[in-house]
Image (cartoon, rainbow, N blue to C red):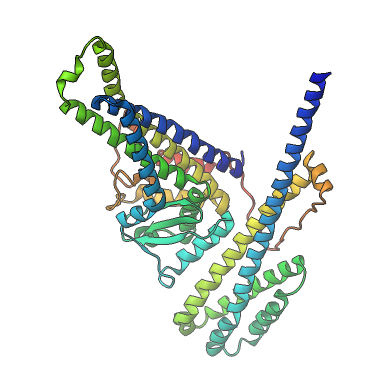
Amino acid sequence: MNIYSEISSNKRNSYILLFVFIIIIIILGYVFGLIFGNSYFGIIFAFIFSIMMILIGYYSGDKLILSMSKAREADKKEHAFLINTVEGLSIAAGIPMPKVYVMEEDSINAFATGRDPKHASITLTTGALKKLKRIELEGVIAHEMSHIKNFDIRLMMLVSILVGVIILLSDFIIRNFLWAPRQRHSRGSGGIFYLIIIVAGLLLAILSPIIAQAIRFSISRKREFLADSSGALLTRYPKGLADALKKIRDDKDKLVDSANKATAHLYLENPLRKIGGKINSLFNTHPDINERIKKLESI
Amino acid sequence: MATLFWVLIIILIILVLYIIISYNRLITLRNRIENAWSQINVQLKRRYDLIPNLVEIVKGYAKHEKETFKMVTEARSKLITGSLSDRAKASDMITNALKSIFAVAEAYPKLMANENFKMLQEELSGTESKIAYSRQFYNDSVMEFNILIQKFPTNIISNMFNFKEREFFKTEGKEKEPIKVKF
């Protein structure tokens, strides 16, 4: 597959995912409504709620993320090399030049966000600017540029919003179930049927956030590998990014202070403390860094 | 009889669809090449405009390096006109001339410390790499386009609508080889 068929498959996957998540949301809405005694109300509520969240996230999600990360726009004089390199790589990728931001932070990291290549931005930590050599910085920027070109930024944005909606809805359901008036559970002949649905719904409410998160992280890991290799296609020098990743691995300071669980998957490499264990690896936002380096070096 | 008729109709529809899709693909690629070509020129022009400033600054510190200045100015005057291969050659000449100017500058510590000089140096090396990147994008697009034109069955369609192969923007320096990446 070449990079263009990768992009179209990414766009297609976005739609399939969106569809799966919307179905989960509709079922959750149904269960939610059931608890209140009107399932249609639940579905409509869930639907309107998610549309609203998607619209807000789609059009202002990147601004929110940038301000949450305390990023400021790069200065043309101070960060001349950074801006030049971003422009150069956007030419190599054949996309409009994204906005460039810098965040005050000692560890080496970077992220890209936005909804499409016309509305995108790349942010680098000051640590990355200080500690990385030019050719390594180029590799990092090419990785982020690939996230933009491959429409990963849009995919991840939508997925994060929908995961958020699912978590909120299931939270509503569990809470309301616990506090809902008890007499509803045993009325007339439909009692047992009703009980089964409620239990199944409750189970779904408990499980769906976990499933949604696992889906989200598995997509995120796949996109990281992809951005590594398509970034190498841009610079024609895979070693640059490999060396940058090595520096991150060996750096004492790995944590990004203003990163949190909601933004962690955006970064070049996991900005939060790592949790060990086999099951936890399902919930890693990034593939193993040594594996990434190995793959880059084998190109 | 009726089945045969419908089979023929369906084959015809598929054929027409295929022609439309291939034609659009060729058009998209051709536009991308045009775009890439104008991007190369934007960057070449940018470098063209920066050179006089550089020569001016360096002259202030290193008056005796007349040969180098002459070389740069000559290479620069050739850049704006000419065919694709002429421009590629002129562009290479400028790249080399700039290298020698920066090599000369090394011998003048005061010049190296000059803020304007430092900024120009950053700007020029940035433009230099932008030229390389735009050339890379241009050549990649040309390659994709040419392959499509040569390959069967798109070659029939490209013949039908008179699509012509494009010329690469070659450079004498060692080009970064396209690398093989598996997805």
Left or right of B4, for residue B129 = left
- A122 versus A84 height, above or below: above
Q: Nearer the viewer, residue A242 or A229?
A: A229
Residue B43 image position (x, y, % from top left): 61, 69
- The image quadrant that residue B36 belongs to is bottom right
| Image coords of residue A112 (percent x, y) | 43, 52
Which quadrant of the figure has residue B136?
bottom right
Residue displayed at 25% across by 9% down = A189
The residue at the point 30 percent across, 54 percent down is A68
Residue A255, image x, y percentages: 29, 49
Quarter of image, res A88: bottom right
Residue, far top: A189
Residue B65 appearing in the image: yes
Location of the N terminus of chain A by quadrant is top right
Residue B156, above or below A120: above
Give the quadrant of the C terminus of chain A: top right
